[in-house]
Image: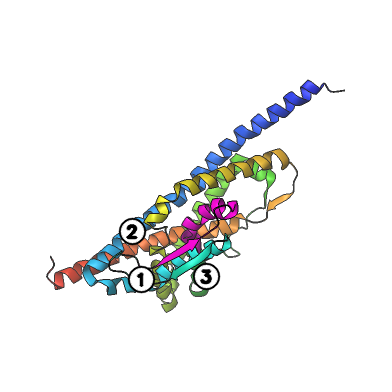
């Protein structure tokens, strides 16, 4: 018969080991996923802000229509759908109405029951960053409709199932990251192919993705409200990993083939940043020429 003290000691050791490993795993995911996404959001936010400022200064509100007519509705609809999903009431939804006084192009006003933890905690975590996911979904749909060759095909190996054991093994993250880099480089090779540049759909695709990318990142107020949501998501990530380590020792499939869509979205968003960088150069050139023509320089 195993002494009761030995059982308690083994349980404590198991829990402490799970806490340590979950902490390390959370930091790994934080560095591989959250930080890169944050950098992407910041890059898109600053580029979009600069582009809008230049267009407004040179062409007035009409200059914002060039990209805002689709980028702003996608941004605001993402907020609205997330608000509805988390039991918030939509009080006012303005998809696109430039306001010269406030500088806003659109907005969503919503209210919720503060006694509802689902609406308060989870809703407060997801709603501010909803444009990132909504914009990613729209970019995916645009790619599917206008430039499907940029999506993973049968030539790209399928992802292995992510089991509890895989998620618990932090060494498995390195090969996954390596595959992400290889797929992003494959997008560069596809774009460099002459066939794409001969298709009018590809030019329409670049323009629409540029419009969406300009407004994909959370706005200034969203960034200011993101501190608490970020902490909530980090805690949920830690607790999920901890539960997997304590009760996920079986070979039960946790998420089947999850990495393929994650890889696709990450690659497309990286590609969108490249398009936004190119768009920044175009906007800079156009506004420079416009200012020279109108004698503002």
Image quadrant containing the C terminus: bottom left
What residue is shown with label 1?
67
Instruction: Report how far apart the C-alphas of labels 3 and 1 lie in the structure.
Output: 18 Å
Q: Assign a secondary structure to mark 2.
A: helix
Position of residue 10 measured from the top left corner of the image (x, y, whole percent)? 74, 26
Which secondary structure type mostly characterizes the magenta part of the structure? helix
| Residue beneath the point at 60% across and 43% down | 172
| Residue beneath the point at 49% across and 68% down | 138
- Please give the count of numbered marks on the rendered protein: 3
Instruction: Report how far apart the C-alphas of labels 2 and 3 lie in the structure.
Output: 23 Å
Position of residue 101 measured from the top left corner of the image (x, y, whole percent)? 28, 66
Would you place residue 128 above or below residue 243 in this image? below
For residue 141, which numbered disc appears in the image? Answer: 3
Left or right: residue 193 versus residue 16 is left
Q: Can residue 281 be seen here?
A: no
What residue is shown with label 2?
47
Choose between 135 and 197: the one closer to the eye.
Answer: 135
Q: Which residues are magenta?
A: 105-134
């Amino acid at each position: 018969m195993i002494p009761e003290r030995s059982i308690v000691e083994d349980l404590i050791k198991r829990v402490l080991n799970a806490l340590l490993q979950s902490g390390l795993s959370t930091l790994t995911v934080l560095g591989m996923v959250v930080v890169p996404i944050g950098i992407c959001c910041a890059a898109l936010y600053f580029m979009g802000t600069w582009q809008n400022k230049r267009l407004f200064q040179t062409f007035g509100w009409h200059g914002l229509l060039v990209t805002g007519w689709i980028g702003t509705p996608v941004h605001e609809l993402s907020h609205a759908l997330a608000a509805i999903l988390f039991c918030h009431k939509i009080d006012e939804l303005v998809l696109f109405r430039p306001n010269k006084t406030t500088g806003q192009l659109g907005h969503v006003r919503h209210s919720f029951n503060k006694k509802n933890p689902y609406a308060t905690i989870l809703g407060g975590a997801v709603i501010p960053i909803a444009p990132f996911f909504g914009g990613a979904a729209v970019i995916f749909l645009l790619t599917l409709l206008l430039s499907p060759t940029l999506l993973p095909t049968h030539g790209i190996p399928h992802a292995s199932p992510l089991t509890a054991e895989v998620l618990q093994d932090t060494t498995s993250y390195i090969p996954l990251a390596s595959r992400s880099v290889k797929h992003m480089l494959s997008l560069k090779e596809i774009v460099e192919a002459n066939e794409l540049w001969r298709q009018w759909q590809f030019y329409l695709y670049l323009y629409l993705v540029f419009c969406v990318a300009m407004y994909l990142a959370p706005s200034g107020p969203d960034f200011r409200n993101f501190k608490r949501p970020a902490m909530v998501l980090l805690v949920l990530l830690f607790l999920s990993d901890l539960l997997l380590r304590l009760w996920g020792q079986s070979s039960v499939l946790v998420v089947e083939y999850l990495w393929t869509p994650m890889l696709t979205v990450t690659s497309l968003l990286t590609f969108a940043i490249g398009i936004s960088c190119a768009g920044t150069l175009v906007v800079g050139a156009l506004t420079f020429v416009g200012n020279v023509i109108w004698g503002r320089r």
